[in-house]
Amino acid sequence: MEPFLANPVSQAEQSTPRERNSVLIAEDDPLFRRILEAWLSSWGYKVTSVDDGAKAFELLHQNDASELVILDWIMPGMDGLEICRRMRSREQVPYHYILLVTSRDDKRDVIRGLEAGADDYLTKPFDAGELRARLRVGKRILQLQDELIHARENLRFQATHDSLTSIWNRAAVLDLLHRELQRAFRTGGCTGILMLDIDHFKMINDNHGHLNGDLVLREVAARIKEVVRSYDFVGRYGGEEFLVVLSDCAKQDVCPSAERIREAIAKSPISVDGVEVPVTVSIGATFASSADTMEQRLLQQADIALYSAKRNGRNRVEIS
């Protein structure tokens, strides 16, 4: 399973395909460079131009680099072919669409350019209409790539997150617990583990319906996320139960962290079908020292503490 982010985002918050209106030109001929700049500007592109390959390669490593790139084959510093090879030798997101331009018109040169990593090839001299059409092709390909990445991220999100609350699902949060315990073992840290259960949740479902019960689950998850740290992990363990993994948490801070969560949920009722419904949680807490990596035993301890909290009146924290 791939590494997780500490703060998952909902599907609505994930990135969407971008509009591309910028082009990087790397061309050492000043006259031809000015012609390209004039054409592209008239078509509404934002243009960045350099006169050697080394400068272009440096710009392509910046976070805001243009994804549409026009490279001359022969340039000082680094030629277009070498830039292509280096760009394609590393796993690169986002992808850069490279249009290689040159006066070479031998078919073997075309093959060399494409095999080096260029996406398209134009032989000088070429007219403005052909360049504009090729850039449109590049934009379509980059747009398609965006859509594929977006679809992949949606699938990844769905595989690791609870569809109702958008927090980690059971399998993912257990995997995160395992990773956190292993990390604490290596670094000598301490991990806090909280098991939460919504008090009298069946009564909420019976009195207000399951759709409103779902609303309560979403609001409880949101309130938990509001008060934990950005590098803690919150997951839906099952039904109305939640699991919180407190990363690198000192033993004396486990109970105060649990109390903050309990208070955040109990502080104000949740509006359910026009009715203000008081909602509370019982929390069972435990912690793992650096030598303790048996997550099943730790989960059992937290679960025992949770049932102790329920037996002792609910809306409280018990620690094992």
Image (tube, helix red, strand yellow):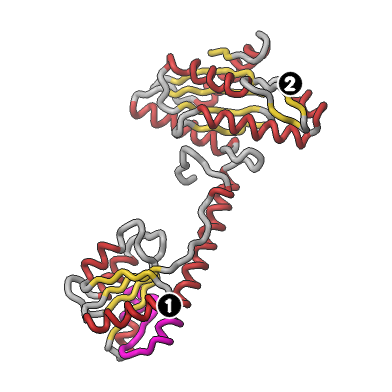
Q: Is residue 249 above or below residue 47?
A: above
Query: Residue at left 43%, top 87%?
Result: 129
Residue type pointed to by label 1: Trp
Residue 121 sits in quarter: bottom left
Which residue in the structure is indicated by mark 1? 43
| In front of the other: 17 or 310 | 17
Query: Residue at left 42%, top 23%?
Result: 249
Q: Magenta stretch?
A: 112-134
For disc 2, the neighbor class at 10 Å (few under 14, some 14 to 19, many from 20) is few
Which residue in the structure is indicated by mark 2? 200
Q: Is residue 7 above or below residue 268?
A: below
- What is the x, y in percent for residue 90? 33, 61
Question: Count of labels shown?
Answer: 2
Q: Is residue 32 above or below residue 277?
A: below
- What is the x, y in percent for residue 312? 66, 8
Give the SS element for disc 2.
loop
| In front of the other: 276 or 244 | 276
Q: Is residue 133 magenta?
A: yes
| In front of the other: 195 or 145 | 145
Q: Is residue 61 magenta?
A: no
Mark 1–mark 2 Cα distance, whole angstroms, equals: 63 Å
Residue 87 sits in quarter: bottom left
For disc 1, the neighbor class at 10 Å (few under 14, some 14 to 19, many from 20) is few
Judged left or right of residue 226, residue 207 is: right
